[in-house]
Image (spheres, rainbow, N blue to C red):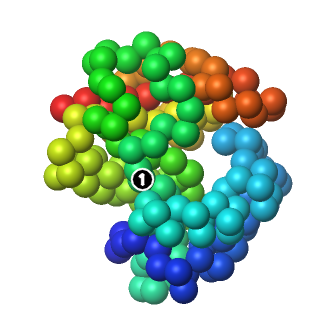
Amino acid sequence: MQIENCRETDVAHVGAFYDSVVLWLDHHINYPKWMYRIYPSESFVREMTAAGEQYICTDKQRLVGAFVLNANPQGNYQKGHWKRDLPDGSYMVLHALAIAPKLQGKGLGTAVVRFCTEKAKADGYKALRLDIVPGNLPAQKLYEKNGFQYAGDADLDRGIEHIPAFSLYELNW
């Protein structure tokens, strides 16, 4: 699997990839509570690509995953019960990780976590953090298996009615 920054020419394809993952989730169990064409959406991908923060995962030129990696928690992470007190900007945050449904459970999520950890370390950050919807068991299992520690549930002041709180996770080094 190759991981690289999303290019402007990839935006529509990556938006369609997220749409297909959300539709699959809607017909199974939508653990992250993503909403079709709302989040994650093509406009979200366009914005993150312009910022240089959208990544794609490919295998033999086939899109198999996508995620965002940046230093923006997109909410009030100060509410977390972190093991290490770090100011915003000193840690990276992993967002919107999606793996093609037919390829889940084959190690691609772990490869993404390793990539993000290595990039955050190389760029001088002190931790990798993230948030998931409480009860998102596949995500919880992935992150805990890769050394993340639970840092409590908190309302991140995002104003999302159907997700009043998020479960926070951190990986410190």
Tell me if 26 is positioned left or right of 54 in this view: right
Q: Is residue 48 above or below residue 138?
A: below
Residue 123 seen from this side: yes
Tell me if 29 is positioned left or right of 111 in this view: right
Q: Quadrant of the N terminus?
A: bottom left
Q: Is residue 94 above or below residue 152?
A: below
Q: Amino acid at mark 1?
A: Leu
Q: Is residue 71 above or below residue 154?
A: below
Name the secondary structure under disc 1.
strand
Percent x, y for residue 22?
73, 57
Percent x, y for residue 27?
82, 54
- At 77% from the left and 55% from the top, the residue drawn is 38
Tell me if 75 is positioned left or right of 41 in this view: left
Q: Is residue 102 above or below residue 133?
A: below
Residue 102 seen from this side: no
Q: Nearer the viewer, residue 111 or 81?
A: 81
Q: Nearer the viewer, residue 123 or 66?
A: 123
Q: How many marks?
A: 1
- At 19% from the left and 32% from the top, the residue drawn is 173
Q: Nearer the viewer, residue 63 or 36?
A: 36
- At 69% from the left and 40% from the top, the residue drawn is 31
- Residue at the disc numbered 1: 69
- At 75% from the left and 33% from the top, the residue drawn is 160
Percent x, y for residue 133?
64, 32
Q: Quadrant of residue 61?
A: bottom left
* Badge 1 density bin: few <14, some 14–19, many ≥20, Cα 10 Å: many
